[in-house]
Image (cartoon, helix red, strand yellow):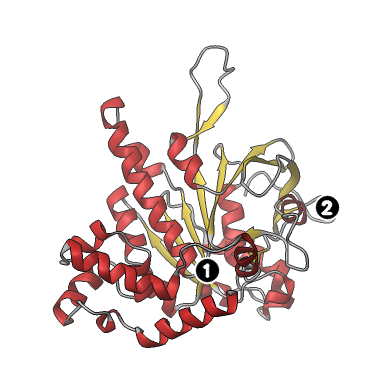
């Protein structure tokens, strides 16, 4: 049955390669949809009727187009065995930190590289200076590694909302992997990173919505949003705007999720924390975004900063992994596991 599902998908993908091939979409409508961020059959398959209606389609046509597109990129009801067979094609990206890779390893991940899964969102939570951005920089390097050593042989898309991306730091981290990358100086690694700075929450959402062509043309296998909630937190002030903020974040994350699934990418978001003001809470830091962010993210990892470059990564929530912790060290050559041969640095 699994082979039949695969054959059916291949048939529809070959028949409907461009959105203009779908019944009900003419040249004018296709142009409008592309401007709205729907330039491929893949993205239409993952869209809602409401989204396509904003691109000029009527409700009935939108539903028919989505239904047809999904025949090539989705499936309805299947058995658990069929799902297991389909998920055997899921890939994983090494973080470049042995202890964190071990922490993220699933029980059924036998014979596959250890690390972060494709087709899902991994959320890195922590206070300022905990190492979230440092780890994000490192992932931009490891995604370009060969698959035989845990890479995805792809490139990275980095949406920066806090002006923290540092090219020189990427080069510094990449030197640890220079033999595998064939890039002794580390300069070529930057060509594998597509960067965009998001100035507002609307700009942030627009960048992601318009990233489809960038992802396809540049073999993007890692999407990083650093940080996810910063712009939303700054713009939606007060309790009266909380509902609007949560709705906007939800739409943004669902868009990211659909892209990760359609293009088989690793999606990583960093998130800020705030003190919990409730009585007897001890003012423990809590992730921004409330239940919306926590529910949509698949794996939520809290990174706590100690001294001498030491970090503790703790799984706060995951549908596939038990709670656990891993010791990491922030060094000149990136985030590493328990090592004594690399200089530690808290000033990076």
Q: Residue furthest top?
A: 279
**Left-right relation of 303 to 59:** right
x, y percentage for residue 37? Answer: 29, 67
Q: Residue at x 73, y 72 (%)?
A: 149
Counting residues from the start of the chain, the first of labels 1 and 2 encountered is 1
Q: Which residue is mark 2?
A: 339
| Label 1 vs label 2, nearer the camera | 1
Q: From what the image shows, is residue 122 above or below residue 141?
A: above
Q: Which residue is mark 1?
A: 264
The N terminus: image quadrant:
bottom right
Q: For the residue carrying disc 1, how many other residues have a C-alpha within 10 Å: few (<14), some (14-19), or many (20+)?
A: some
Q: Element under label 1?
A: loop
Q: Residue furthest bottom?
A: 14
Q: For the residue carrying disc 2, how many other residues have a C-alpha within 10 Å: few (<14), some (14-19), or many (20+)?
A: few
Q: Quadrant of residue 31?
A: bottom left
Q: Residue furthest right?
A: 340
Q: Quadrant of residue 285?
A: top right
User: Toward the viewer: 295 or 123?
Assistant: 295
x, y percentage for residue 213? Answer: 36, 75
Residue 259 appears in the rendering: yes
x, y percentage for residue 347? Answer: 63, 45
**Left-right relation of 331 to 31:** right
x, y percentage for residue 260? Answer: 48, 63
Q: Residue at x 56, y 36 (%)?
A: 127
């Amino acid at each position: 049955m699994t082979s039949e599902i695969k054959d059916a998908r291949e048939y529809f993908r070959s028949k409907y390669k461009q959105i203009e091939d779908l019944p009900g979409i003419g040249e004018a409508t296709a142009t409008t949809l592309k401007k709205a961020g729907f330039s491929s059959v893949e993205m239409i398959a993952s869209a809602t009727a409401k989204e396509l209606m904003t691109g000029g389609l009527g409700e009935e046509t939108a539903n028919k187009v989505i239904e047809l597109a999904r025949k090539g990129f989705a499936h309805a009801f299947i058995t658990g065995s069929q799902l297991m067979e389909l998920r055997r094609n899921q890939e994983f990206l090494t973080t470049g930190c042995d202890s964190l890779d071990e922490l993220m390893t699933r029980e059924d991940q036998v014979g596959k590289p250890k690390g972060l899964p494709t087709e899902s969102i991994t959320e890195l939570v922590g206070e300022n200076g905990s190492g979230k951005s440092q780890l994000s920089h490192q992932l931009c390097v490891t995604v370009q590694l060969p698959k035989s050593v845990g890479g995805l042989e792809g490139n990275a898309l980095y949406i920066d909302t806090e002006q923290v991306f540092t090219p020189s730091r990427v080069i510094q981290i990449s030197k640890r992997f220079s033999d595998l990358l064939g890039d002794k100086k580390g300069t070529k690694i930057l060509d594998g990173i597509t960067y965009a700075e998001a100035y507002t929450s609307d700009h942030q959402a627009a960048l992601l919505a318009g990233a489809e062509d960038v992802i396809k043309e540049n073999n993007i296998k890692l999407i990083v949003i650093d940080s996810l909630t910063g712009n939303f937190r700054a713009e939606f002030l007060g309790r009266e705007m909380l509902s609007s903020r949560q709705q906007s974040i939800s739409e943004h994350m669902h868009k990211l999720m659909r892209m990760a699934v359609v293009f088989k990418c690793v999606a990583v978001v960093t998130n800020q924390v705030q003190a919990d003001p409730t009585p007897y809470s001890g003012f423990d830091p809590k992730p921004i975004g409330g239940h919306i962010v926590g529910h949509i993210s698949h794996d939520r990892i809290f990174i706590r900063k100690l001294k001498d470059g030491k970090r503790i990564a703790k799984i706060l929530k995951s549908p596939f992994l038990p709670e656990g912790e891993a010791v990491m060290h922030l060094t000149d050559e990136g985030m590493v596991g328990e090592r004594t041969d690399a200089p530690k640095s808290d000033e990076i």
